[in-house]
Amino acid sequence: MMDLLGNPAVWASLFTLTVMEIVLGIDNIIFISVIVSRLEEKAAKRARQIGLALALIFRIALLSILTVLIGLTEPVFSLFGEAFSWRDLILLAGGLFLIVKGTHEIHQGIEGGHTEQSGAAAVGFGAVIAQIIVIDMVFSVDSIVTAIGMAQHVEVMVAAVVIAMIAMYIASGPISAFVQRHPTTKMLALAFLLLIGVALVADGLGFHIPRGYIYFAMAFSAGVEIINILASARRKAG
């Protein structure tokens, strides 16, 4: 352990991996923020805490079975000349889930009014947690497979994951509150979920879309939305 602490390369690896885990965690935060928005404030906070705690547990559990996880990238069957691994299938399933969920939420948002209220009543705390568990598992596999490729020491991976989850927990509250205060941002967040879902499906099919492109598009769109919100607030104040 002391050898690791005194190794500059290990610290550089920890910093790089932590930043990468935080960036990959943006997807998780957006999904949780959107899915808990239909719950009451206290229930939403508890759901966020449970969701992020489960995300941390899933990631550490996956790190404890590295040999199994590495095996997930091995091809299990081929279809139309394309080899598929368990990781590919998990990403496909998760991407399709996000696309279906995002489309459903956008449809309810467009319907508006009584439909949204009845939908809020129909979605229980247990159902929200179940959906968070499903997507946590998908994002955890993607996150840890990335971690394995970037670091050689399990201790470094665990430390990076824990630090990233603390940062995600701190950020999740303000992001959820912002989405609640500004309903238009929820539609933008749902569009992000669709984008992430398509990227996961493409990744599962062997067409890797660089995450930098996706996050740049998300950051640009979020920046435009923030300018719109500020302009609208100034008009109301004037």
Image (tube, rainbow, N blue to C red):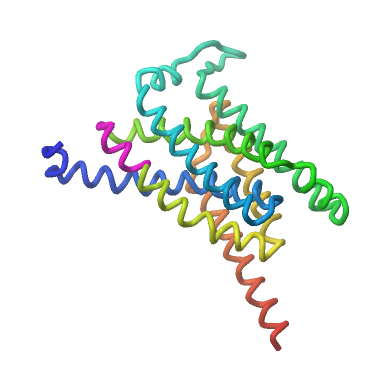
Magenta-highlighted residues: 152-161
Above-or-below relation of 204 to 191: above
In the image, what residue occupies the spot 54% across and 44% down?
Answer: 28
174 up-or-down from 76: above or below:
below
- Which residue is at the far bottom? 238
Task: Give the main secondary structure of the magenta stretch.
Answer: helix
Q: Nearer the viewer, residue 108 or 226?
A: 108
- Looking at the image, residue 112 sits to the left or right of residue 42; the answer is right
Extreme-top residue of the structure: 77
What's the residue at 26%, 42% (across, down)?
A: 13
Camera-nearest residue between 225 and 176: 176
Magenta span has 228? no
Q: Is residue 216 above or below residue 235?
A: above
Q: Residue at x 66, y 46 (%)?
A: 35
Q: Position of residue 184 (x, y in %)?
A: 71, 61
Percent x, y for residue 174?
Answer: 54, 61
Total tally of numbered discs in the picture: 0
Q: Where, by quadrant of the figure, is residue 89 drawn? A: top right
Residue under the point 57% across and 34% down: 133
